[in-house]
Amino acid sequence: MNEEVAEQAQDQLIEITPDAQEYLRELLAKQNKEGMGVRIFVERPGTPHAECCMAYCPRGEQEEGDVRYDYDGFHAYVEGESTRFLEDARIDFKKDSMGGQLTFRAPNSRVPDISEDAPLEQRIQYILDAEINPMLANHGGNCNLQQLTDENVAVLEFGGGCQGCAIVDVTLKQNVETTLQERIPELQGVTDVTDHSVRENAYY
């Protein structure tokens, strides 16, 4: 996608402090590539595990839907789907004896925002991240969607303390499957593909 095609915003979405802008200008200048900017996005937005990310973005390599924001001496391209999670975000740079550290705070990055018409896979993973994995984390475990079958059966894999756990069948049926089907009525069932013969980290 060419830079001229990127949607350009009039107002700044993310506050980048003067110190942070100076640091980014120096960092980008060291890349020795004309038009080098940064691309900002949120991984796993709207969940307790959301992470704000920033990467180099050479001219012409921004993606469709990105929104361009102009700062002093450089451009920042924000992933279109991440914009609503980056409202009130702030990037700062604090100098210290080791040189300094860039900090990125986005209070809305973990705010749930998923619609009823979102893809079924996205809705399943969201519920796993927002409701089920925090519970499993108390036992050192986690659960992720590996596949959704044509029959709308969720194929899950457990990890951490849940892998090899003697009561995983109870957890799967009484907690995970019940919660998912209550939230997503069109889900027909849940199955587990975890290799539970590996028991080194099992909670029970």
Image (tube, rainbow, N blue to C red):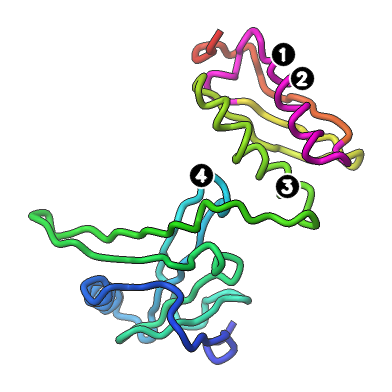
Relative depth, front residue between 153 and 196? 153
List x then y, in percent, for residue 77: 48, 76
Which circle's residue, 1 or 3, is located before the other in the chain?
A: 3
List x then y, in percent, for residue 128: 65, 37
Q: Is residue 78 left or right of residue 114?
A: left
Residue that badge 2 annotates: 173
Residue that badge 4 annotates: 49
Relative depth, front residue between 137 and 192? 137
Q: Residue 4 lies in magenta, yes or no?
A: no
Q: Residue 178 lies in magenta, yes or no?
A: yes
| Disc on res. 3 | none
Which circle's residue, 4 or 2, is located before the other in the chain?
A: 4
Residue type beneath disc 2:
Lys
Q: Disc 2 to disc 1, how far (Cα)?
A: 5 Å
Residue that badge 1 annotates: 170
Tell whether label 3 touches label 2 (CB within 8 Å).
Answer: no
Tell whether label 1 touches label 2 (CB within 8 Å).
Answer: yes
